Amino acid sequence: MTVKLIAHTLIEKEGKYLLIKRSKIKRGLPNVYPSYWDIPGGGVEENELPREAALREAMEEVNQKIRIDKIIHEDSQFDASKDTVFTRLVYAGRILEERDIILDPEEHTDFIWISSLKDIESELIVPYLIDIFADKPI
């Protein structure tokens, strides 16, 4: 069995949170949760701490230099088809310097700033985000 660590950041600015919409196809293959709203994040690489991965992913996925405050969510799940346990850490973060948001169209197709999930209630949302917003205050 393999264990895979994933680090995400819920980025806040002026009481709003940054969400990004996952692409349908990622590097030529069907994406996991296609067209769902998510937050910046991804796999922790070898010799990298989860906090460092979250900072790197925010820069790679949305061009944002952020400060991480604290862990606000953790979950784990076993994927039998991959014989892998996926553990996700989600940090609360804030933007350090105002920059344009730049998305990689291979990974994400849109972004939005929201104050609550009601702002996108008719849209698809990754399940763990529903838990995070239900547990607010962040």
Image (tube, rainbow, N blue to C red):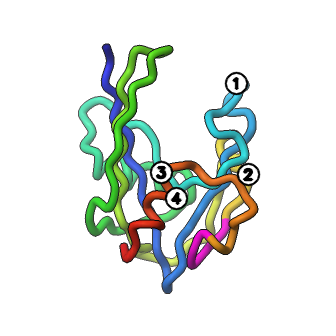
Of circles 4 and 2, the one toward us is 4
Q: Amino acid at mark 2?
A: Thr
Amino acid of disc 3 = Tyr
- Report how far apart the C-alphas of labels 4 and 2 lie in the structure: 20 Å
Residue beneath the point at 37% across and 46% down: 7
User: Mark 4 near mark 2, Cβ–Cβ under 8 Å?
Assistant: no
Q: Quadrant of the N terminus?
A: top left
Task: From the viewer's side, name the closer residue of 35 and 97.
Answer: 35
Residue 96 is a magenta residue? no
Q: Which mark is residue 130?
A: 4
Relative to 28, is 88 above or below?
below
Distance CA(mark 1)–CA(mark 2): 15 Å
Horizontally, residue 35 falls left or right of residue 97, namely: right
Q: Is 114 covered by the magenta stretch?
A: yes
Name the quarter where the C terminus is drawn.
bottom left
Give the percent coordinates (x, y) of residue 43: 41, 37
User: Which residue position is annotated with label 3?
Assistant: 128
Q: Residue at x 73, y 58 (%)?
A: 123
**Mark found first going from the N terminus, 4 or 1:** 1
Say above or below: 86 vs 82. below
Disc 4 secondary structure class: helix
Name the residue tied to disc 2: 109
